[in-house]
């Protein structure tokens, strides 16, 4: 049976998809077009006039060592956040999958961090690792480690990665857990009879069977690391020290709204647009081939 | 290859006991069918032999070795699941080779064994396919192949044919039996289908509510059912069961005397198989005929015992027509085909 609905006229279908299209046009395409347009100008600091510079903004950006450093920072940050958000989530899901009693309580508790807004999560972690009054930094001090993410770029990066990945573990956990539950019991049992121990079963049977979920989460988490971590970075490090946690999105904000260089900021947005587009295409083209649906 | 001994197997889930002490000793190379209605504990019993369920009390021996506390992988068994449980991301060849690969068998040998099993099961052309590209019967064969490449001591089958259509089921039934004959590997086969049990088993275990009602060859169970349950479960259509009485050494169904017996006077359950009624003008058993179902080779007649409203099913060879006017027809029954069971306990009474 044909599952699609066939319409006779064209008015009703247009009406039905109109809200989606209108929202996309107003909130996505219009700002994106604005960004592309603005990236070709350099406005004066008061926003009263703008000078057309062609690709000048892009030229300047690509030769700017700070901007190139931000690319590297973003790559490192995204890889770390994705890894720290996905691997522990999978591990926790595997543990929960084996639970029989109390699994709903365990699951509910694991989901809580997801409900915490990024900025709040950032402040939370900031308090814990505050160099003067933070609980975590005090304990580290007891072990003789002098924590100071305000001065140490590596520690700053570690902290924002931790804070960004933390809330995300819940989200990933939910998906992994559902995927694990969907793996047929009898397939696992067949593997057990075939002689495979738990971890062998996990790597040769379970992991391939949940790969569609893993792939989906990979895409979603990378996008998250690129864009949605802004609040956390803003509250914890504000991109510092010395731009060591300035990822591309943060630089768009910092240059545009703090530095008042809207032309450069727009150019950066355009570049970011291409980078993310490219990443997604690569993910779908190369990684998806290895996924078993 | 090995013998299998189950000693007083009991299984509890929490406080609920589902299997109440099963004792059976299976000879090397024997094909045992565990048959019973759903929920009777037959699959649980099989899974305990496989090591997928723990045993609450009792012992399991495979080849004289106690395996109760061993992991499935240490028991040297292979199992065919109802839904086949093939690894969906692996090709047929990889599916079959998985166990051997884990066992560390050299690559050439794996290749050779898989090829051999594939030839035996006519899977050679399908070796590079994924399970989702196969039909039900082919998947079933792959599951069989995966089990037999490992040359286990015992084969376990958990309702392997119930997802197949009727025709394929008959064909696979023969194939499995043939294969088992050829390989001579001790097999335990769980099914709810009494025809499968009758045709495949060397011996069958008739299970009901966690109890082995009868353990014996198919014909034993058919001819001498030990309990009312076994009598009704085995045979199709099911045996007619009537509330009857023994009076003065005579079996009486209402006013009809059906023959002598040594049983004590009192209420009994009387069992007669549909195929054991013989049409006879002078037959003592008068039956009011209601509906006939001609099946070609035989005809099933549904009716009532005259002067009562006891329903009765009779199977006669060949084609018979009835005209639906509640005709009365006489039947006689050979005394050897009368089964008597104790009314409360359902145990067979000595003839």
Image: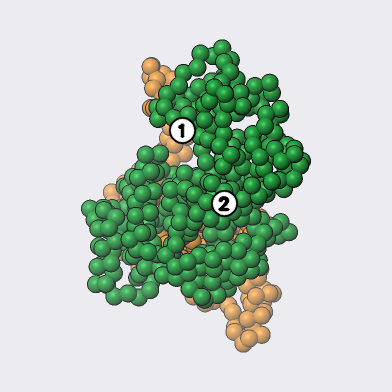
Q: Residues within 10 Å of mark 2 (few under 14, many from 20)?
A: many
For the residue pair B119 and A233, the one nearer the viewer reads as: B119
Q: What residue is at 74 percent from the left and 45 percent from the top? A: B264
Position of the N terminus of chain B, as image quadrant, is bottom left
Residue that label 1 marks: A20
Please indicate whether residue B257 sits to the left or right of residue B91 in the image: right
State the image coordinates of residue A147 (x, y, percent, origin top left). Answer: 59, 79
Q: Secondary structure at mark 2?
A: strand
Question: Furthest residue to the right?
Answer: B266
Q: In the picture, which chain is green?
A: B
Question: Image quadrant of residue A226?
Answer: bottom left
**Mark 2 against mark 1, which lies toward the viewer?**
2
Q: Residue at x 38, y 43 (%)?
A: B170
Chain painted orange: A
Q: Helix, strand or loop at disc 1?
A: helix
Tell me if label 2 and label 1 are in contact, CB under 8 Å. no
Q: Residue at x 69, y 23 (%)?
A: B308
Question: How far across and how far down the image is residue A21, in percent?
Answer: 43, 32
Front residue of A132/B31: it is: B31
Q: Name the residue furthest bottom.
A: A144
Q: Quadrant of residue B43?
A: bottom right
The residues tagged by marks 2 and 1 sit, at their Cα atoms, a distance apart of 63 Å
Residue B276 visible within the image: yes
Against B58, residue B192 (above or below) is above
Residue with the mark numbered 2: B206
């Amino acid at each position: 049976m044909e599952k699609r609905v066939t319409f006779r006229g064209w008015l009703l279908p247009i009406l039905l998809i109109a809200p989606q299209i209108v929202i996309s046009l107003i909130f996505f395409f219009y700002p994106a077009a604005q960004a592309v347009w603005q990236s070709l100008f350099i406005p004066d600091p008061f926003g009263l006039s703008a000078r057309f510079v062609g690709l000048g903004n892009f030229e300047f950006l690509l030769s700017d060592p700070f901007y190139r450093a931000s690319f590297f920072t973003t790559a490192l940050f995204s890889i770390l956040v994705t890894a720290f958000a996905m691997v522990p989530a999978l591990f926790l899901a595997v543990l929960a999958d084996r639970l029989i009693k109390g699994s709903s309580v365990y699951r509910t508790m694991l989901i809580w961090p997801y409900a915490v807004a990024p900025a709040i999560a950032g402040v939370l972690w900031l308090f814990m690792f505050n160099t003067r009054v933070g609980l975590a930094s005090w304990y580290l001090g007891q072990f003789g480690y002098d924590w100071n993410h305000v001065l140490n770029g590596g520690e700053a990066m570690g902290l924002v990665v931790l804070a960004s990945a933390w809330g995300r573990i819940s989200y990933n956990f939910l998906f992994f857990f559902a995927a694990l539950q969907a793996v047929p019991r009898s397939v696992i049992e067949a593997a057990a009879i075939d002689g495979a121990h738990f971890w062998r079963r996990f790597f040769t049977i379970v992991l391939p069977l949940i790969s569609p979920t893993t792939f989906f989460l990979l895409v979603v988490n990378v996008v998250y690391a690129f864009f949605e971590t802004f609040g956390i970075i803003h509250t914890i490090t504000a991109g510092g020290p010395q731009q060591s946690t300035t990822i591309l999105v943060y630089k768009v904000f910092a240059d545009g709204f703090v530095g008042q260089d809207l032309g450069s900021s727009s150019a950066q947005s355009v570049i970011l647009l291409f980078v993310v587009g490219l990443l997604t295409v690569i993910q779908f083209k190369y990684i998806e081939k290895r996924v078993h649906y | 290859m090995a013998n299998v001994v189950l000693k007083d197997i009991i299984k509890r889930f929490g406080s609920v006991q589902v299997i109440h002490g099963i004792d059976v000793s299976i000879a090397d190379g024997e094909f045992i069918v565990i048959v019973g209605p759903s929920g009777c504990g037959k699959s649980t019993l099989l899974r305990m032999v496989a090591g997928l369920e723990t045993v609450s009390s009792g012992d399991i021996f495979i080849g004289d070795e106690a395996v109760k506390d061993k992991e499935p992988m240490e028991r040297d068994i292979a199992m065919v699941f109802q839904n086949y449980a093939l690894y969906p991301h692996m090709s047929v060849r990889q599916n079959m080779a998985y166990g051997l690969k884990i066992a560390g068998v050299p690559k050439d040998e794996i290749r050779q064994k898989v090829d051999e099993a594939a030839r035996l099961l006519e899977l050679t052309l399908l070796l590079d396919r994924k399970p989702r590209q196969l039909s039900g019967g082919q998947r079933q064969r792959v599951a069989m192949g995966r089990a037999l490449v490992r040359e286990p001591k015992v084969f376990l089958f958990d309702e392997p044919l119930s997802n197949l259509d009727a025709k394929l089921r008959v064909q696979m039934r023969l194939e499995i039996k043939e294969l088992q004959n050829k390989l001579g590997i001790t097999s335990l086969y769980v099914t709810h289908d009494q025809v499968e049990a009758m045709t495949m088993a060397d011996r069958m275990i008739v299970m009901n509510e966690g109890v082995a009602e009868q353990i014996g060859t198919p014909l034993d169970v058919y001819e001498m059912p030990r309990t009312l349950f076994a009598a009704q479960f085995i045979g199709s259509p099911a045996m007619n069961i009537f509330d009857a009485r023994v009076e003065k050494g005579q079996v009486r169904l209402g006013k009809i005397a059906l023959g002598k017996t040594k049983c004590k006077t009192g209420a009994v359950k009387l069992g007669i198989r549909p195929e054991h009624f013989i049409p006879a003008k002078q037959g003592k058993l008068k039956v009011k005929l209601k509906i006939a179902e001609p099946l070609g080779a035989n005809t099933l007649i549904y009716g009532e015992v005259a002067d009562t409203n006891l329903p009765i099913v009779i199977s006669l060879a060949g084609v018979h027509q009835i005209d639906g006017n509640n005709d009365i027809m006489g039947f006689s029954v050979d005394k050897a085909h009368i089964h008597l069971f104790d009314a409360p306990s359902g145990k067979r009474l000595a003839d």
